[in-house]
Amino acid sequence: MSRIQLSAISPRFRHIWFRNLITYRRIWQVNFIVPLLEPGFYILAFGLGFSGLIGGVSYAGLDLAYTRFMAPALVATACMWNAFFETTYTSFVRMYYQKTFDGILATPISLEEIIVAEIVWAASKAAAAVSLMLIVLIPIGYANFPGALACIPLAFLGGLAFGAIGMFFTGIIPTIDMFNLPIFLFITPMFLFSGTFFPVSGIPDWAAIFTLIFPLYHLVELTRFFCIGAMESNPVLNVTYLVLFTVLFTYLGLLMMKRRLIN
């Protein structure tokens, strides 16, 4: 009963996506403010606090102001937070408390289509958040135009990756309070050690190996490439990693959610 049926996935999942969009439109004002103001707060805080202490950052042969180095990473982390929280806390509420999934399953839409729709919706929210951040970052010179616009489809890919692993955790976490574990053990270390606040080239080789495992590292590198035109890794390998990560955890997310809801 818990076997994944790929044939059950059809374009009908778009109806779930539209359902989430209609719900989101009722609270969009609150969600609109955070990605619009967040980069300004970070840049102001780090610019005032760290610029005098750190000065410039050497990255991929460039000498960058610390805030210019960090700004593209804020875009990548916004993508991660938006997608991951959507398919963990928000999806869990729809599944467990609101019984939305149960109601949808009474229609011809399959469970596989519900899960795919949740992941795609999370990726859509991530891309929207990044779009809002670029509205702030491009005019103040922290993201190159028009190259930084490529961060929007990149955010959708990153959103699929983090939405998929979020759905995987939703399939195995017993209660909503337990989401603190993947956040503390997975999201927080990834946020700190994925080249977000310092170049990975400056850490020991053994630590850099662990950094390569994190999907956020690959997203940060690609975001910096589009925002400042430089990176320390291979973009083909970064994109390939994100695609494979998405495929793997989409499958695992489907498997875990089906086992949880069917069994």
Image (cartoon, rainbow, N blue to C red):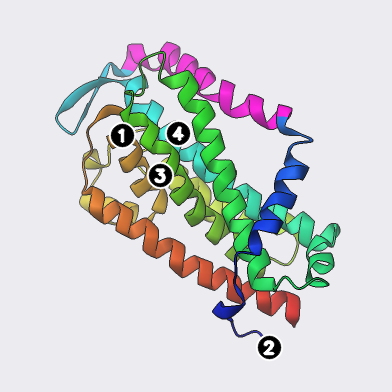
Secondary structure beneath dot 1 equals: helix
Q: Is residue 203 left or right of residue 196?
A: left
The disc labelled 2 sits on which kind of residue?
Met
Residue highlighted by disc 3:
154
Q: Earlier in the sequence, mark 2 or mark 4?
A: 2
Q: Earlier in the sequence, mark 1 or mark 2?
A: 2
The disc labelled 4 sits on which kind of residue?
Val
Q: Residue 120: which numbered mark, if any?
A: none
Mark 1 Cα-neighbour bin, 10 Å: few <14, some 14–19, many ≥20: many
Q: Can you give x and y, in whole percent of width and height, for residue 167 in the image?
A: 61, 62
| Disc 4 versus disc 3: nearer the observer | 3
Residue range of the region highlighted in magenta in the rendering:
29-53
SS majority, magenta:
helix
Q: CA distance from mark 4 to mark 3?
A: 10 Å
Q: Nearer the viewer, residue 139 or 204?
A: 139
Residue highlighted by disc 4:
75
Q: CA distance from mark 1 to mark 2?
A: 44 Å
Badges 3 and 1: C-beta atoms under 8 Å apart? Answer: yes
The residue at 48%/56% (across/down) is 161
Verify whether residue 47 appears in magenta.
yes
Badges 3 and 2: C-beta atoms under 8 Å apart? Answer: no
Q: Nearer the viewer, residue 10 or 94?
A: 10
